[in-house]
Structure formats: structure tokens, C-alpha cells
Amino acid sequence: MTRLLTPQDIAQIVATRGLPDVLRRLEDAITAGFLRWQEFDKTARVASHSATGVIELMPIADRTHYAFKYVNGHPGNTKAGLSTVMAFGVLADVVTGAPQWVSELTLTTAMRTAATSVMAARALARPGSRTMALIGNGAQSEFQALAFHYGLGIRQLRVFDTDPRATAKLLRHLQAVPGLAVSVHASTAEAVRGADIVTTVTADKRNATIITPEMIEPGMHLNAVGGDCPGKTELHPGVLQAAQVFVEFEPQSRVEGDVQQMPADFPVTELWQVLAGRAPGRRDDAAVTVFDSVGFALEDYAALRLMAELALDLGLGQPLDLIPALADPKDLFSQLQPAPALRRAA
């Protein structure tokens, strides 16, 4: 039987478990997946680009489950009252191929992206980091802010966005969060000054230079989330040249990440190697580290499995008639024939 998880189901999971617990569980699940890196059949996502955005499919599988996500990225959507990013996903049984879960992944993607950011910062940022600059205050900004506050102990949040309405929205959602002080700044350069961690989560589909070399201070960790498709970047190449750069899946990041600007032999390290102790992370407290995050299917796999588990615990998820129920598995055609009573009536 296939079950459906709606946005309302995900909201109920968060309301019941609490956002800090869900974010922690997501980070744990994604970390566990990265530590099983070599057990997965991996591929870069398949993208269909247009003048206004991109639609992508993100597949992955291990020996038990196959998962994929459909996701778009259309920065101009907000003018039409639509989300910039919309997503859903499927979790299937590898042994039979039967789809077990169909789930919304718009809310879940925002949470898993934030959890992945914290996972990377836990491995790469300086211990004791307490101040973060958040550049881009749109749909994913609250998730990033709260994940770093709950998960990594960020106490000071320095924010900037070219759209003051986005910043006002962020402030409204964060104003009652205990232990988190938020300050609004007039520019990116002002916001990043003195920050231990800099998170960029902008949406424009262009080669932007949100962070430039003169903004970088020794010891910073940069969490570059917004550059996630060809022709869409946030970091000046000089920032990358002066930093240790870490990615999720190198074949995908070379095409979609900020490192698309760099030569093919520019050195990067896949994050799983750091988590597994196979490669070093930060060299020292003065080093600048960059997590060039584009989002990878393994993160969605982990999130789908976790949400399915939590939904079962809470009795959530509706049956979905996605696959025909056959009395005889070899007789598919009978599904197109009307019932005997209906044939007689005709």
C-alpha cells in the first residue's frame, strides 16, 4: 500500500515532536546516510532548464530503498504568488519496486537543507562559533536560523536582504525565540563583519557575487546554499581560491555549485570523507572553510525515511490509490472493464 504525506502531516509531526527535535533527528539521519556513502547508487540530478528556472529529478538508492525528489527552482514565482521552490518525493521498496510513500518535500526540503548546513558546520566551523550572518531572508531563512540556533548554539544573528519585506518577515518569526538576538544590517559587508559563520541563501538565477574576498575574515566558515544550478553562484572566485572547499557529490557540485566557476582541477573535498575520518577538515582556527552546498539526493532519502517513520509513530499518512489492486497480477486489462452491474445497466 502506498501512503501519502501532505504538508499538513509534516506540520503535525513538527507540532508534536517540536522543531528542535525534528531538526536534530534530520541531522542525525543525514549524517548516518553520509557515513554509508559507498552503499548508495548515486547520480547527479537530472535538470531541465528554462529561461525562468529549472525543474530537477534527484534519484538515489541503496539495497533496501529507492528514493527520488521532483523539485523546481523559479526565482520569479513569488510575483505570481507561487513558491520559488516546490517539491515532492517518493520512497519505494527496492525488492519489489512498490512505491511505499509519496510525500510533500517543500517543507521537508527546507528542514533537511538546514540540517545539512548544521551537519557541515559542526564538522568544519570553529568550535564555539556563536555569531552567524544570514544573507538572504527569504523562504529558507528561518529554517537556517533556527537550525543553527538549536543545533550549533548560535546566539547572534546578523541579517541582510535587498528586500526589506523579507527581513521584516524573518524578524517577525524569530522575535520570540529565547536566546537568539537578531540585528538587521544595511549591506552584506556590514552583516558579515565579525561573524563566525556566514550563510548565503539567495535565490536569483545568475552568477552573483554576494560574498567578495575583502569581506572574508580569518577563521570564517561559509555555508553557501543559494548557488545550486549552472549559471547561479554567490561567491566571488577569489573567496574559493583562498579557502578549503567542501562539497556533497563532486560530479554534481562541479556543474551546479559555486565551484562551477573554477578550473576542473580546483581541489575540493567531499564532505562524507571528513565525517568518516578519511580526509581532514579545517586545518586550523585561522583557515577559511566553504561548504558549497547544492543539495544532494542522499539528504532527501534520509529525510523521506525519517518522516515516514515519524508519521507511522503518530498514525499519519493517508492511503493513496496510486497502483491498481489486482486480484490476478497478470490481468491488468480488467481494470479498464466496467463492473458487471454497470455493463447490464448499459
Image: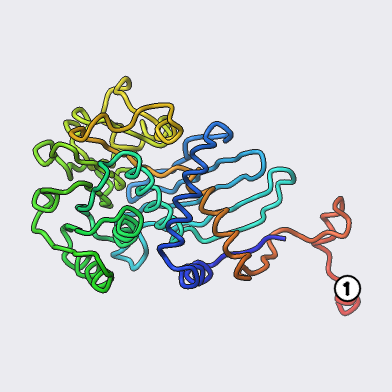
| Residue 284 visible | yes
Residue 241 percent location from the top left of the image: 20, 28
Say few, some or many: other residues with alpha carbon within 10 Å of mark 1 (under 14 / 14 to 19 / 20 or more): few
Residue 290 percent location from the top left of the image: 27, 37
Q: Residue at x 25, y 36 (%)?
A: 289
Left or right? Give the position of 190 relative to 312. left
Quarter the N terminus occupies: bottom right
Q: In the rendered image of this protein, does residue 249 appear above or below residue 113?
A: above
Left or right? Give the position of 310 relative to 82. right
Q: Quadrant of residue 293?
A: top left
Q: Secondary structure at mark 1?
A: helix
Residue 286 percent location from the top left of the image: 18, 34
The residue at which mark 1 appears reads as 343
| Kind of residue sitting beneath label 1 | Arg
| Residue 135 visible | no
Left or right? Give the position of 158 relative to 95. left
